[in-house]
Each structure stands twice: as C-alpha cells, then as structure tokens.
Image: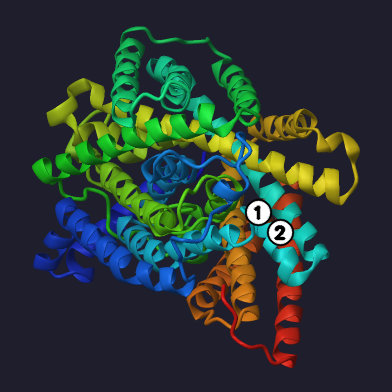
C-alpha cells in the first residue's frame, strides 16, 4: 500500500475541519471549493499561456516554415515519415506523452497533500516549465536531423557526455515501461470489461493506417470508421468481459510487454501514427464530456484543499513535484519529441501546436483528473455514498479505477453507467501508447548506446535490444511495482532538468538568450535530486536494494552531466562567440 490509509485519512479529516475555520474565509472557501471555478480558471490560464508565452519560445527558436524538416529530407518509410496532417502528428505526440502519468500523479497527490497544491503545480508547471521543455526539445531535435537530445549533448559537450546521458535515459525508460505495464495489467485484471476495447484498438488502428496511407481514404472518413468501430468495441467489452483468473495481473503484464515488443518494431505509419491519432480523438471526446459534466453538475471539491506538508509520500516539496510526474513537466516528453515526433513533422509552422500545445492539453487533462477524484468522489464516511469514497478506492494503489469512477460521476448525465468504463478505457489506451513508444525509444537508445557506442554487436539488432528491454522491464513489473512510481517520477523529472541543461548549453553556444530554459532547469535539478536522495534513503531503510541502487546510480549519472555542462559553459565563457542562427 502506498501509505497508511487510516492515519492519512484521520489526519486529512482533522486538517479539513481546521481549514473550515482558520485557513480560508467562508466566502473564499466556497468559491475555491467549486470545481467549475477551478476548471474555468485553468482554461483561461492555459489559453493565455499558449497565446503569449508559447509565442516567446517559438521566437526564441526562430521557427521557419520554409525550412525543410527531417521527415521530408530523410524520408525512409519506417521512422522518417511526414504525418498526413498536423492533427495526426499532434495525436501521436499527445497520446505518447500523456499515458497514465498526467492522471495517476494528480490522483495520488490530491490524496496525500490536497487538491490545491496539485492544481497550482499543474497550471504553473505546464505553462512555464513543461511547455518550454517540450517545444525546446522538439526544436533542438529538428535542428539536428531528428536526432535525440543525447546526440545534441554530444555536439555540445562531447561523446562521453552523450554516452552517460543515454545511459541515464535508457534506465529511466525501462522504469517507465515497467511501471505502465504493471499499472495497465492491474486494471485489466480488476476491470475485465476494458479488455476487448484495449486490444481491439490495435486492429482498428492498423485498418485506419491502411485507409489513410495505402488506400487514400480521406482523413475524415477514416476517422469516422475508426471511431465507430472503437465505440462498438467499448460496448462489446461491457457485455463480454474477459477475466483470466487469480493470476490475471501476471499474465496481462507478460502480454502487454509482448505487445510493446511487436509494436515498437513496426513502421510508424502502420500502427503508431493512426493508433495514437485515434486514441487522441477518444481523449478529445473524453475531455469534452468530462468538462461538460463539470459545467452541468459543478460538484464541490469534496476532498480537502490542503492536507499536510508532510504525508506518507514525503514532503510537499520536493515529492509532490515528482509524484505529479507528467502533468506539469516530464522528461519523457523530450524523448518522444526527439525520438519519434521530430521524424514525422511535415512543416515547422506546426511545431508550436504539437510541442507546446500538447503539453498544455496534458495540463487540461490533469486538471480534469484532479476534479474527477476530488470533486466527483466523496471524502468523508458521513457523506454516505457506498463505492464512491476516494480514500477507499485508493486502497492498494487502484489508481486507474479511482479515476474512472470519479470520471463516471462527472459524465453520468451523458453516458450513464458506461461513464466509468469510458474513463478507464480512455486512460488504458494511453497506457498502451506510452508502452510501445517508450519501448521503441529505448530500442533506439540501446542500439546507439550498447551496439554502436560500446561495440556490443548483438545489441545493434533491434530484436535482441528489444528483448533485453523486455526481460528487465518484466522483472521490475512483477516485483514491488508500486514502489517504482516515486523513483520513476524522480528519474523522469530529472531527465527534464538535464534536457533543459543540455538545451541551455546549446543556446548559449549559439549566442542565444537561455534564461527561458535555464531557470526551469535549475529549479527542476534541485527538486529532483532532492527527491531522488529522499527516496533512495527510503529504499535503503526498507531493504529494497535494487531500487536503492537504481536511484543512486541515476543520481551519480545526473551529477556527471551537470559537471560536463559546467565545463562546457566554462569553455564558452573563455572564447568570444558571435551570435549565430539556432
């Protein structure tokens, strides 16, 4: 269990009574606890952030629609393939970066520290940190022929820095794959109604890919066909649940990792692009229904706005900033931006829409997840709603079902009893996209790091390198997988900090203003290093040697990258450089 439920619940109820009288005036408290006010405030701030701050970052990178993109210059029909329309690429990028992170993080954070700190971090982080990180990683990859940030590190800091950075990222990706496989397997075993649509979407995606790329069917018609089939699968799954018995979680974990193995070696335009595009359409409908439900029902935020500075997951800072691993900023996004997305962009004019826009939409999704559990569910036993108690649903780490139940309450006026399953299905399809995208990127890095860099010839083969990833992720996923989430969050956010450091060094080497990336880099570096040390010490005290070793190794690798960045900056200061184009 992630935390001691009884003590956490008692403390939270006590704090909630105190806030009634001491923290907020009555009128302000009533406004702050209304879910509609939170939703509208977040929407306005995200819109302003995209319009004004996103434009500043776009100007920093001197976006030029006439410059040919890597997808056009290096087309190969497998990885470098221009998306048919920017909305298709947006769908792939958003579905890949979203995954379970922007939902699971807020669901946990609101339970431990309260919904208000989580909401503030989601909004501020998405606009000033996450959006900057994502668009900058996207642009620097475009400037380097669609290569990863690890290659950019080599061009700025040298080969040694690239190898260390790639090793750090590869380890973090294996954690991503293990966590999401375990989370998805648990949901399939406890909610058998979502099995058919979860796997059926793969076949539908292949069909849509063939319709658009092989048979030249219009995007609109292909989308209608795909969505009709997908909705039919949701209905079929509701009436025909598939259960695999007492060992279902183990079996589903193996099946999911095998799926990720196969999907990660297929051409992107056959499965990856159309599947992610379809999934993103599902999410758009899910967001529309969810926020429409907030408008109609506008439930109060039943959970406490603030619970404690020190919960069972640690201190509000730094731990909340890494528990919410994707909704505000995520290093995994840079791996997607430089691993698959930059190889599919047809024109630079769409870079801001895909890079910055997708991050803010992820923030919108995270705020909805927050409202679903803190407003759609209930907190106190005396509210007397069996099966809708937020703390009870969270027991045992059943995060996806908790979100699905809360979401189902929000959309009840539209979807009735299907609301919960649509919510779970919406999240499950994103987990699938993250699994195979992360496996594909880990394969790229394994071939580059071990096969080319360390000259281990067998690992140049995509089947061998993917098999290694499969085995390690399976061992971690079948172990104490709930304990992996905090260290996954810390390593994920640390990647974001290191990526921003590499990008800042790159900008400085070109004579550009780097404050937009350097300030977030310093904040995230301090935050995530503190969280990594905190969790590693926890693992040592708890006898979890493997996780402690992984945490400390990530810490040491991060220190080395910082050292290399400092050396590079010192060299740049010693020579006079004229301003050159990015």
In the image, what residue occupies the spot 66% across and 62% down? 533
Query: 187 or 447: which is nearer to us?
Result: 447
Residue 392 in view here: no
Task: Look at the numbered discs 1 and 2 and tell me whether their residues touch, using CB distance below 8 Å.
Answer: yes
Real-space CA distance between mark 1 and mark 2, rounded to the nearest whole angstrom: 6 Å
Against 468, is 294 above or below? below
Against 415, is 562 above or below? below
Q: In the displayed structure, does residue 122 sit left or right of residue 457?
A: left
In the image, what residue occupies the spot 55% across and 16% down? 248
Q: Position of residue 158 (x, y in %)?
A: 79, 68
In the image as oriented, which residue stretches furthest toward the front?
66
Against 96, is 356 above or below? below
Q: Which residue is mark 2?
A: 151
Q: How many marks?
A: 2
Q: In the displayed structure, does residue 256 sit left or right of residue 297?
A: right
In the image, what residue occupies the spot 44% across and 19% down? 207
Q: Position of residue 114 (x, y in %)?
A: 34, 56
Residue 141 in view here: yes
Q: In the displayed structure, does residue 352 sit left or right of residue 143?
A: left
Query: 58 or 520: which is nearer to us?
Result: 58
Query: 566 or 545: which is nearer to us?
Result: 566
Q: In the displayed structure, does residue 185 sit left or right of residue 212?
A: right
In the image as oriented, which residue stretches furthest toward the top?
240
Q: Which residue is mark 1?
A: 147
- Give me the disc on residue 480: none
SS at circle 1: loop
Q: Quadrant of the C terminus?
A: bottom right
Query: 582 or 474: which is nearer to us?
Result: 582
Dot 1: within a 10 Å radius of its alpha carbon, few (fewer than 14), some, or many (20 or more) residues?
many
Q: Position of residue 74 (x, y in %)?
A: 63, 47
């Amino acid at each position: 269990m992630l935390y001691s439920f009884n003590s956490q619940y008692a403390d939270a109820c006590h704090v909630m009574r105190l806030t009634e009288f001491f923290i907020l005036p009555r009128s302000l408290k009533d406004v702050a606890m209304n879910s509609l006010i939170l939703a509208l405030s977040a929407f306005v701030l995200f819109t302003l952030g995209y319009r004004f701050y996103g434009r500043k970052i776009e100007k920093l990178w001197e976006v030029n629609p006439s410059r040919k993109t890597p997808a056009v210059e290096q087309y190969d029909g497998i990885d470098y393939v221009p998306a048919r329309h920017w909305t298709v690429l947006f769908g792939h990028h958003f579905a890949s970066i979203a995954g379970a992170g922007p939902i699971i993080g807020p669901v946990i954070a609101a339970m431990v520290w309260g919904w208000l700190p989580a909401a503030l971090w989601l909004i501020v982080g998405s606009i000033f940190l996450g959006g900057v990180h994502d668009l900058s990683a996207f642009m620097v990859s475009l400037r380097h022929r669609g290569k990863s940030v690890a290659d950019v590190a080599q061009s700025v800091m040298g080969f040694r820095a690239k190898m260390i950075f790639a090793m750090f990222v590869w380890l973090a990706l294996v954690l991503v794959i293990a966590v999401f496989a375990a989370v998805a397997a648990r949901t399939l075993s406890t909610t058998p109604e979502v099995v058919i649509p979860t796997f059926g979407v793969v076949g539908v995606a292949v069909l849509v890919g063939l319709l658009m790329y092989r048979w030249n069917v219009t995007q609109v018609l292909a989308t209608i066909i795909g969505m009709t089939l997908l909705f039919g699968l949701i209905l079929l799954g509701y009436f025909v649940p598939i259960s695999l018995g007492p060992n279902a979680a183990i079996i589903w974990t193996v099946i999911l990792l095998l799926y990720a193995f196969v999907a990660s070696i297929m051409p992107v335009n056959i499965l990856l692009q159309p599947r992610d595009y379809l999934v993103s359409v599902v999410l758009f409908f899910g967001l529309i229904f969810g926020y429409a439900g907030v408008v109609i029902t506008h439930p109060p935020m039943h959970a406490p706005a603030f619970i404690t500075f020190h919960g069972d997951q640690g201190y509000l800072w730094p731990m909340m900033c890494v528990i919410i691993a994707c909704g505000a900023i995520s290093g995994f996004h840079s791996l997607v931006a430089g691993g698959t997305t930059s190889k599919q962009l047809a024109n630079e004019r769409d870079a801001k829409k895909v890079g910055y826009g997708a991050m803010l939409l992820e923030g919108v999704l995270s705020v909805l997840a927050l409202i679903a559990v803190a407003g759609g569910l209930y907190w106190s036993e005396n509210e007397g709603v069996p099966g809708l108690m937020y703390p009870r649903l969270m027991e045992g780490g059943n995060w996806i079902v908790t979100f699905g139940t809360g979401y189902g309450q929000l959309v009840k006026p539209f979807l009735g009893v299907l609301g919960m399953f649509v919510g779970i299905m919406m999240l499950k399809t994103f987990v699938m996209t993250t699994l195979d995208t992360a496996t594909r990127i880990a394969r790229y890095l394994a071939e580059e790091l071990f096969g080319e860099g360390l000259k281990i010839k067998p690992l140049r083969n995509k089947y061998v390198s993917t098999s290694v990833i499969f085995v390690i992720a399976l061992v971690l996923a079948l172990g104490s997988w709930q304990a992996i989430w905090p260290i996954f969050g810390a390593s994920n956010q640390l990647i974001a900090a290191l990526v921003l450091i590499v990008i800042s060094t790159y900008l400085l080497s070109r004579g550009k203003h780097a404050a937009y990336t350097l300030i977030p880099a310093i904040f995230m570096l301090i935050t995530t290093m503190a969280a990594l040390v905190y969790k590693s010490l926890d693992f040592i005290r708890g006898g979890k040697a493997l996780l402690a070793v992984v945490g400390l190794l990530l810490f040491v690798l991060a220190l080395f990258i910082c050292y290399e960045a400092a050396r590079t900056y010192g060299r740049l200061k010693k020579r006079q450089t004229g301003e050159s184009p990015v």
